[in-house]
Amino acid sequence: MSGETTAESWEEIVVRVLKANDVSLVSYVPDNVLARLIRLIEADPFFTVISPAREEEAVAIVTGAYMGGKRGIALMQTSGFATVVNALASLACPFQIPLVMMISERGTLGEFQQGQAIVCRTMRPVLQSLGIEHFAIQEKAQVEFVVDGMVRQAFATQAPAALILSPLLTKRAA
């Protein structure tokens, strides 16, 4: 991977790294924190973008695409992660599908929605109990290394992986 330039935003780095790893399918449910990343991906003809109604549908789309030979990623926020646990435990984990998830972390650092805060406290323990590799990116300097490493690891080991985008990176509490 080439090093980041100081002019690149974290979102632009993510786009570049996904392309370098041939992750061309993106499935997401709209999220304010991920809005700029989503706009960049939608504007790039490299990507096939699908926006389902629910996060577990995004998981199904990405896992199905993998079975058809296409690499993908599911974008969601913390509360959306709470809806995908059954799909992870009954599909992605037991069938060793390298489902890459990018989760904008809500529920911390000034969050005003109680539901977000509750899910935030349970997200990492759930990932841990399912044996899903996960890492919280807190600084722009970590984005390229972590996203590239987690994507490569997911596909090399055929295991789900979660990239958690901390509010320290995204600069948004809600």
Image (cartoon, rainbow, N blue to C red):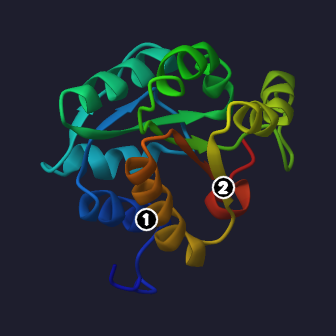
Which residue does the image show at 39% across and 18% down from the upper left? 60
Q: Which residue does the numbered mark 2 point to in the structure image?
A: 135
Picture quarter with the N terminus? bottom left
Give residue 34's position: percent from left, percent from top: 50, 45
Does 99 appear above or below 168? above
Q: Do the CB atoms of the residues marked 2 and 1 lie less than 8 Å apart?
A: no
Badge 1 element: helix
Point out the tag, 2 or 1, that comes first from the N-terminus: 2
* Type of the residue with mark 2: Phe
Which residue does the image show at 40% across and 59% down from the upper left? 152
* Type of the residue with mark 1: Asp
Does 144 appear above or below 126? below
Give residue 166's position: percent from left, percent from top: 69, 55
Please tell me how many numbered marks the rendered image carries.
Answer: 2
Near-viewer residue (17 or 79): 17
- In which quadrant of the rendered view does residue 114 lie? top right
Near-viewer residue (3 or 11): 3
Which residue does the image show at 38% across and 44% down from the upper left? 38
Give residue 156's position: percent from left, percent from top: 39, 53
Q: Which residue does the numbered mark 1 point to in the structure image?
A: 148
Question: Real-space Cα distance between discs 2 and 1?
Answer: 12 Å
Is 146 placed left or right of 62 in the picture? right
Give residue 101's position: percent from left, percent from top: 50, 40
Badge 2 element: strand
